[in-house]
Image (cartoon, rainbow, N blue to C red):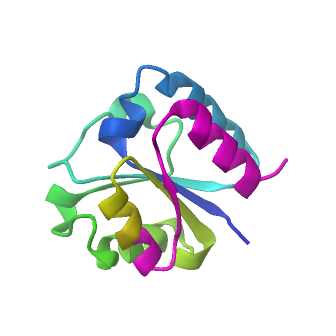
Amino acid sequence: MLRGLVFDYAGVLTDPDAGDLLTAVGRLRARGIRTALLSNADGGAGRGRLARYFDVFVFSGEVGLAKPDPRVFHLTAGRLGLPASACVMVDDSRRNIDGATAAGMTGVHHTSVADTLAELSALFPA
């Protein structure tokens, strides 16, 4: 059963229509889905304004691991209190999605907000 949702920042949450993604994240979080932002940034990108959407923030510059290394996905899942197999990773990089699936996560390759929302609706039905 999927109980965790992990989002990349740049390329996903910087999409012009990212507000729709954040609305969906907020709804899922209200249903008890644990949420994380995982970024290869040095740290801090969007942390303040996104705090109400995410339970956990993991920045490569702070933890010394970067996507697509499967260890960073395991670390993120662990911080959510979940096994990787209970998490979905949303990223615009196919390489990073490959790393997430190697770690046991379900991957959603973000190409558009509409497509990502459709995939999340299928993975986390109401």
As drawn, the residue found furthest toward the top would be: 16
State which quadrant residue 27 falls in: top right
Q: Is residue 55 above or below residue 2?
A: above
Q: Nearer the viewer, residue 78 or 22?
A: 22
- Left or right of 97: which side holds 32? right
| Residue 109 colored in magenta in the image | yes
Q: Is residue 36 visible?
A: no
In the rendered image, residue 2, in percent from the top left (x then y), is placed at: 68, 67
Residue at the image point whose x is 32% and y is 33% from the top: 46
Residue 63 in percent (x, y) is at: 21, 66
* Residue drawn where x is 41% and y is 34% of the image: 13
Camera sees residue 15 = yes
In the rendered image, the quadrant that contains the N terminus is: bottom right
Relative to residue 83, is residue 56 depicted above or below? above
Could you tell me residue 74's position as x and y percent? 40, 77
Query: Between 96 and 49, which is closer to the camera in this rendering?
Result: 96
Left or right: where 111 falls relative to 38: right
Measuring from the top left, give residue 30's x and y in whole percent. 72, 43
Start-end of magenta stretch: 100-126
Q: Is residue 78 above or below residue 90?
A: below
Whether the magenta-drawn stretch holds residue 99 is answered as no
Q: Tell me the residue at 60%/61% (across/down).
A: 4
Depicted 67 relative to depicted 25: above or below: below
**Quadrant of residue 11 in the image?**
top left
Question: Which residue: 31% across, 71% down?
Answer: 72
